Amino acid sequence: MGGRVTPDVCVQVAILAAMAEQMTNGQPGTPYHGSKWAVEGFSEALHFELAAFGIGVKIIEPGGVSTDFAGRSFVFTHDPELTDYQPLVDAYLAAAGTPTGQIEADDVAEAIWSAVNDETTQLRYQVGAGAQQVLGQRYSAEQDESFVAGMRAGFGL
């Protein structure tokens, strides 16, 4: 074990997360959102910790990706026998409607490739207009860059 990453060796770690690590949208699925927020905290901490060794950590935050995610993921909450919970599920499904503006898996792959090869210390990469719009309401890229720069300066990274 040991050794630091040298200038001739570039190590980047890309962690695929989701918009749900930065915000919740009222959808039933507290365990899902909780796990995504855990990924965010873990990834952010790892970003700062590994910087001391010359290792970059990038968080990839895609918006909706064209898959059957919504269909199969809501099966556990869409149980009409859970009568107390059903009004929440019904309200969310009515408001959610048909997903629009989804990106393709290739868009996410391209974002990962770009992130690990951009030679910056940028932490988060929002993928797709949906992610940028929704997460832009949560925080701005400038606020995030300022936060990351402040943490790096404060801890001498």
Image: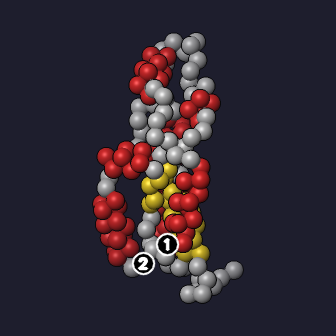
Q: What is the secondary structure assignment of the residue under circle 2? A: loop
Residue 154 picture location, percent across and down: 34, 74
Is residue 54 at all visible to an observer of this figure? Answer: yes
Say which of 49 and 23 sits in front.
23
Horizontal side of residue 126 vs 146, given as left or right: right
Neighbourhood count class around disc 1 (C-alpha, 10 Å): few under 14, some 14–19, many 20 upward: few
Residue 80 picture location, percent across and down: 56, 13
Q: What is the secondary structure assignment of the residue under circle 1? A: loop
- For the C terminus, the quadrant is bottom left
Q: Which residue is mark 1?
A: 118
Q: Which residue is mark 2?
A: 157
Whether residue 125 is situated above or below residue 23 in the rendered picture: below
Residue at left offset 54%, top offset 53%: 107
Q: How does the figure colour the protein chain or chains?
A: secondary structure
Q: Which kind of residue does numbered mark 1 sit on?
A: Asp
Residue at left offset 52%, top offset 60%: 111
Whether residue 96 is situated above or below residue 8 in the rendered picture: above
Residue at left offset 41%, top offset 35%: 25
Locate residue 81: give its quadrant.
top right
Say which of 112 and 139 sits in front.
112
Neighbourhood count class around disc 2 (C-alpha, 10 Å): few under 14, some 14–19, many 20 upward: some
- For the N terminus, the quadrant is bottom right
Farthest-out residue, bottom: 7
Q: How far is mark 1 from mark 2, CA to CA?
A: 19 Å
Mark 1 or mark 2, whichever is nearer to me: 1
Horizontal side of residue 137 vs 35, given as left or right: left
User: For residue 141, which numbered disc appears in the image?
Assistant: none
Q: Which kind of residue does numbered mark 2 sit on?
A: Leu
